[in-house]
Amino acid sequence: MDTADANTAIAAIIPAYNEGLVIGSVVLNARRFAGHVIVVDDGSKDNTSEIARLAGAEVITLEENAGKSHAMMIAFARAKEIGSPATVMLDGDGQHDPAEIPAVAAPVLAGAADLVVGSRFLNAKDSEEIPGYRQIGQKVLNSATNVSSGMKCSDSQSGYRALSRKALENMDFAANGYGIESEMLAHFAERGLVITEVPITVTYEVPHKHKMNPVKHGLSVLGGIIQLVSIKRPLMCFGVPGFILTVVGIFMAVQAFDIVAKTGVWSTNVTLISMMMLMLGMLLVITALILYSISALMRK
């Protein structure tokens, strides 16, 4: 497949919220590398829809702002209808370079991957330009996402991705807020889809930057990941802490009995703490076993 045919086989989907200043250039550049460009206007108050449509995109306009995950699920449904061999998702704020669409889509078009994650951290020079607070937050979210998915991803929150037709067929999970990237990784990993990464560049000098306070955004995503871990890996989330608390509680109970044997006096503090740790530990272990059983039944 030559370059022109490969580009025609790509569908680009772009979520946008109040991006009237830049969405036109994003769409025009994306059209150079994708045969079909879809913009989902997530309840913008400006002229995002009009400009995107004039730039040549198919525009799906939502009446109210429902969040990136909701907008993306609508875009994925439309991309599935189109049936393109590769679907590339990128942000509408200008952070992502549309010229990298072919590179991100290449493993999918070659049949080597079902999901390709564009990573800001694979290029050492580019990663040095990422603001420090973003790098710290990203490492925390990466660690949590990797635990939930059971795989290693260097940029779990990247919104620059390519999906195969098989991946679109497996977009059958619920996603809310900004957590779709983490949930996608965990869901696809569980389904056994092939996931890989390619290096990308990102610019942070964009008009609107992030729509949400970075701390609030990070905590929101982290909360979603913790919830995901508790569902996907209950033995790790609840069972391991429960087991540790139970062991410590038993150890402290032995210490309490040892104190009684030596002094004839109960150590109230040690006894109460050991009882609390034993009860909490056993409760967590039981919770883990129940959730694991439910999860196993749901998978079957």
Image (spheres, rainbow, N blue to C red):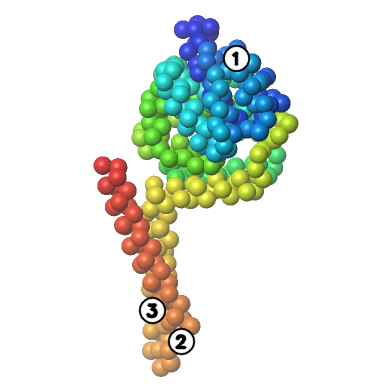
- The span from disc 1 to disc 2 (Cα, nearest Å) is 77 Å
Determine whether 141 is above or below 16 in the image.
Answer: below
Q: Earlier in the sequence, mark 3 or mark 2?
A: 3
Residue 56 badge = 1
Pointer 1 local density, CA inside 10 Å: few below 14, some 14–19, many at least 20: some
Residue 41 visible within the image: yes
Query: Quarter-wise, where is residue 57 in the image?
Result: top right
Q: Earlier in the sequence, mark 1 or mark 2?
A: 1
Q: Secondary structure at mark 3?
A: helix
Q: Give, as a three-letter code, the residue at label 2.
A: Ser
Q: Secondary structure at mark 2?
A: loop
Q: Give, as a three-letter code, the residue at label 1.
A: Gly
Pointer 3 local density, CA inside 10 Å: few below 14, some 14–19, many at least 20: some
Q: Secondary structure at mark 1?
A: loop
Q: Which residue is mark 2?
A: 267
Cβ atoms under marks 1 and 2 closer than 8 Å: no
Q: Residue at x 50, y 42 (%)?
A: 176
Query: Quarter-wise, where is residue 48 in the image?
Result: top right
Q: Where does residue 38 sit, x and y in percent of width and height?
A: 54, 21
* Front of the two marks 3 and 2: 2
Q: Give, as a three-letter code, the residue at label 3.
A: Val
Determine whether 112 is above or below 137 in the image.
Answer: above
Q: Nearer the viewer, residue 186 or 132?
A: 186
Q: Residue at x 67, y 45 (%)?
A: 213
Q: Which residue is mark 3?
A: 254
Q: Quadrant of the C terminus?
A: top left
Q: Where does residue 190 sit, x and y in percent of width and height?
A: 37, 38
* Front of the two marks 1 and 3: 1
The residue lying furthest to the bottom in this view is 264
